[in-house]
Image (cartoon, rainbow, N blue to C red):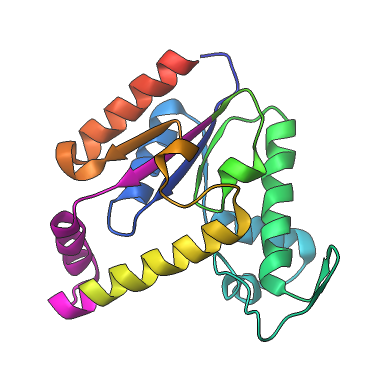
Amino acid sequence: MGKQMLISISREFGSEGHTIARKVAADLGITLYDRNILEAIAEEKETKVEKLEQFDEVPRNMMLTRSVGEHTSSMEDHLVNMQFEFLQRKADSGESFVVVGRCAETALKGRDGLIKIFILGDKEEKHQHIKEYFHISDGEATAKIIRHDARRKLYHNRYSEFKWGDSRGYDLCINSSRLGVDKTVKIIEEYIKERM
């Protein structure tokens, strides 16, 4: 596969979307960008990554920020712009990569090698996975899923051009509960191969 691959993976919490993204990147021999984008930006800006993490993938607090035209006091907005610029620079360099979340489909919009994927899962499967992964109770797992998905939805809908999880905004939507992680990875890789 000689063409540039820009794989944007959005996911429901508990769908194992991050694990799937990691495996796809490894199998294709390309870089995975997720929270490590923050480390790169922190190094570039000579600041601590912890300062950036508190504003990562959260919508801005409307009560504590002001916007005038294109200018904003929102650290959330500034961090989104920094991440968009980071991804655009990487794409401009010709690098192929997989990105988890971060509205990458909007940051990389219009580029030839962009493939937009959304991974969802069955409620019971996601619940069980979160319970086992975090070693928490049923109630805690349910609350964690609701909280994380609500935050992702708010963030995505603020910074993207289409609604989070709306199939019309993605090239491929797949339920990882139906086939499991490895077969879902295989289906995604087949799709990428056909597109390339």
Q: Is residue 113 above or below residue 57?
A: above
Q: Is residue 168 above or below residue 14?
A: above
Instruction: Identify which residue, 156 or 108, lies in the foreground.
Output: 156
Q: Is residue 137 visible?
A: no
Residue 175 in the image: state x and y as whole percent.
25, 41
Instruction: Identify which residue, 121 or 85, lies in the foreground.
Output: 121
118 horizontally vs 105: left or right: left
Residue 3 in the image: state x and y as whole percent.
59, 16
Q: Which quarter of the figure has residue 59? A: bottom right
Give me the residue at 78% from left, 64% from top: 45
Q: Which quarter of the figure has residue 26? A: top left
Q: Is residue 168 visible?
A: yes
113 horizontally vs 80: left or right: left
Q: Magenta residues?
A: 115-141
Give me the residue at 22% from left, 72% from top: 142
Give me the residue at 66% from left, 44% from top: 107
What count of labels does the image hold?
Answer: 0
Give me the residue at 23% from left, 35% from top: 182
Q: Is residue 151 magenta?
A: no
Residue 51 in the image: state x and y as whole percent.
65, 76
Residue 91 in the image: state x and y as whole percent.
68, 34
